[in-house]
Image (spheres, helix red, strand yellow):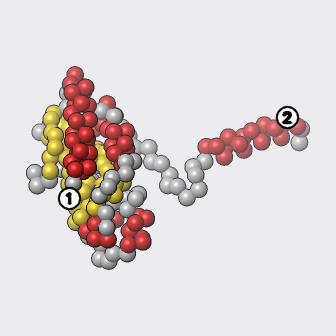
């Protein structure tokens, strides 16, 4: 084999290695973009929620963010519970959702309370698993808040009011942070 072919083959191998996903990671699914996804992108919801999840709170353990979606809604959520052995019993899901209601896209920010649903509790396994996903132990798909949940903000999304919605999101996140720190 000529030296040029060997070099070209070597370059192709390096490119293939570079394109591979890390060992053990799940294959990323490219889902079609929905209008709800675009609304959340316009609000920079994922990055705003990621900042909260990275903070070290005194009384809660916070995880996420994660994008959740179904046909008629999309959301970005973080989840948290009280510190301590019995903190797992109630998980709170805090998120921002774009969803349809009466033919228009609504923007909702709220907190949902999820009781522990698994038949047994193993602290070691729970501690590792909850960092990546809340659905296993709490049997929930991350749907938008309903009337029984704590609704912090809800408004019809209008593109011309994008900056107002974004400010409302930032204000809501700031007041939630203040509330958590004050407890």
Examine the rendered structure and indicate whether residue 3 appears above or below residue 93. Answer: above
Q: Secondary structure at mark 2?
A: helix
Q: Nearer the viewer, mark 2 or mark 1?
A: 1
Residue ID at (38%, 72%): 123
Residue 167: % across, % down:
24, 30
Q: Which residue is mark 1?
A: 113
Q: Which mark is residue 4?
A: 2
Asked if residue 58 shows in the view, the reply is yes
Examine the rendered structure and indicate whether residue 61 appears above or below residue 85. Answer: above
Residue ID at (16%, 40%): 153
Closer to us: 27 or 24: 24
Closer to us: 178 or 14: 178
Residue 45: % across, % down:
32, 38
User: Could you give the CA–CA distance between mark 2 and mark 1, rounded to whole angstroms?
Assistant: 63 Å
Q: Taking 105 as reference, is 38 left or right?
A: right
Residue 34: % across, % down:
31, 38
Q: Earlier in the sequence, mark 2 or mark 1?
A: 2
Q: Residue 97 occupies which quadrant of the picture?
A: top left
Residue ID at (32%, 71%): 85
Quarter of the picture containing the N terminus is: top right
Q: Residue 156 occupies which quadrant of the picture?
A: top left
Closer to us: 160 or 174: 174
Q: Residue 100 occupies which quadrant of the picture?
A: top left
Asked if residue 65 shows in the view, the reply is no
Residue ID at (12%, 39%): 102
Residue 164: % across, % down:
21, 27
Q: Taking 132 as reference, is 138 left or right?
A: left
Q: Secondary structure at mark 1?
A: strand
Do residues under tags 2 and 1 come within 8 Å of each other at their CB atoms? no
Closer to us: 146 or 80: 80
Q: Taking 49 as reference, is 11 left or right?
A: right
């Amino acid at each position: 084999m000529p030296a040029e072919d060997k070099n070209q083959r070597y370059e192709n191998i390096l490119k293939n290695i570079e394109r591979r996903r890390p060992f053990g990671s799940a294959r990323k699914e490219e889902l079609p973009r929905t209008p709800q996804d675009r609304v959340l992108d316009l609000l920079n919801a994922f990055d705003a929620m990621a900042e909260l999840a990275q903070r070290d709170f005194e009384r809660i353990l916070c995880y996420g963010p994660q994008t959740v979606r179904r046909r008629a809604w999309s959301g970005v959520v973080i989840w948290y519970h009280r510190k301590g052995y019995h903190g797992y019993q109630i998980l709170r899901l805090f998120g921002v959702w774009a969803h349809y209601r009466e033919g228009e896209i609504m923007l909702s920010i709220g907190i949902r309370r999820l009781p522990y649903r698994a038949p047994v509790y193993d602290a070691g396994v729970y501690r590792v698993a909850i960092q990546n996903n809340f659905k296993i132990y709490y049997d929930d798909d991350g749907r938008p808040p309903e009337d029984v949940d704590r609704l912090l903000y809800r408004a019809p999304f209008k593109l011309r009011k994008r900056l107002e919605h974004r400010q409302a999101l930032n204000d809501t996140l700031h007041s939630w942070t203040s509330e958590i720190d004050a407890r």
